[in-house]
Amino acid sequence: MSERYAAAGVSLGAADEAKRRIADLVASARTPLALGLPGAFGGMVRVPADVERPVLVLSTDGVGTKVLVAARTGVHHTVGEDLVNHCVNDILVHGARPIAFLDYIATGRLDPTVAAALVEGVARGCRAHEMTLAGGETAELPDLYQPGHFDLAGSVVGVVDERRALHGDHVRAGDVLVGYGSTGLHTNGYTLARRIVFETMHLDVSDRFPDTEATVGDLLLAVHRSYFAAIAPVLSHVHALAHITGGGIPGNLVRVLPEGREAIVDSGGWRWPALFRVLAREGRVSLAEMRRVFNLGIGMIAVVPFEGVDPVRRAAEAAGVPTWVIGEVRAGPRGVRFSAR
């Protein structure tokens, strides 16, 4: 049976080798909340005892076509960390702390070295957030994926006290918008960015990116920043958080605004990093489309009362994350509006 399976494009031997390499990585990312044995059919994790009214917060996502850049460069050990950080940011928006993670790798032909590198990044991200890598799945699907291609996705489980969960309902007119610096594209906009960089600009991953000292590969594979260390200590000062992913600032900030509240974003409140300026110029991308597709250097926005601005920004500085005051909330029709640039 295994010979027929191998002839169809699936290697059970490669799967066994990948599992062997991944096992130690999974074991390195377990916490005291973890239950059961690594490699079980399901991962188990305790709910933290210090949360009086626990609510589980769950999110699932992928890293999109950033995986094509990883495949093109041969650098596979960072996109797993991207995945973890993206998912952690998504539940941080609700005030939750992460406790468990699951990953999913799908590929045309399983390369145990690549699979181990992907999980290496996932495990590193889990250890950084002191959460358990509770399990995952690796699928070899030769009829679905082209040779050398793979997809990477994951799910996070977090917990928050019901009384402290953030929903955006506390946002008030007069609140201030604090923008947190991104480390690049994060995990969104890669389909357009790759087309501009590789097809319009005719650059490859080892070339220097214009207006920077970085290579194309290094710039496009910069790890999606986690904002947990910068924000978790000051959540009591925050009325709402918006993770700036697909849809950009307007598509994500609006998700945490209640009816009757309008966010006014100061277009001159921060300077776009060179990456975005070059993409706009060389790709001839309109300002409106840039705002819808990319984060433009702002990876998270905190909506805070005026008196909370200083402690929120000090916490970010202590975590090494730059911030800017980029606008305010006013009474008005629910939405996001940019001031004149």
Image (cartoon, rainbow, N blue to C red):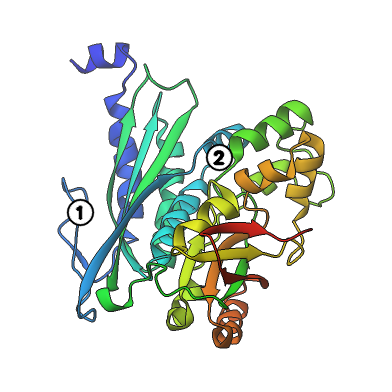
With 337 as the anchor, is 35 left or right in this view?
Answer: left
Q: How many marks?
A: 2
Q: Position of residue 46 (x, y in %)?
A: 18, 67
Residue 152 visible in the current orientation = yes
Amino acid type indicated by mark 2: Lys
Q: Which residue is mark 1?
A: 43
Please, what secondary structure does the residue beneath circle 2 have? helix
Determine which of the numbered discs, if any, sits on residue 232 in the image.
none
Disc 1 crowd, CA 10 A, few/some/many (<14, 14-19, 20+): some
Nearer the observer, 292 or 281 = 292
Reply above or below: 29 against 61: below
Reply above or below: 321 against 194: below
Residue shown at the point (36%, 53%) measured from the top left = 25
Q: Position of residue 7 (x, y in %)?
A: 31, 11
With 270 as the anchor, is 100 left or right in this view?
Answer: left
Does the residue at mark 1 contact the one at mark 2 (Cβ under 8 Å)?
no
Disc 2 crowd, CA 10 A, few/some/many (<14, 14-19, 20+): many
Reply above or below: 28 against 175: above
Amino acid type indicated by mark 1: Gly
Residue 202 visible in the current orientation = no
In front: mark 1 or mark 2? 2
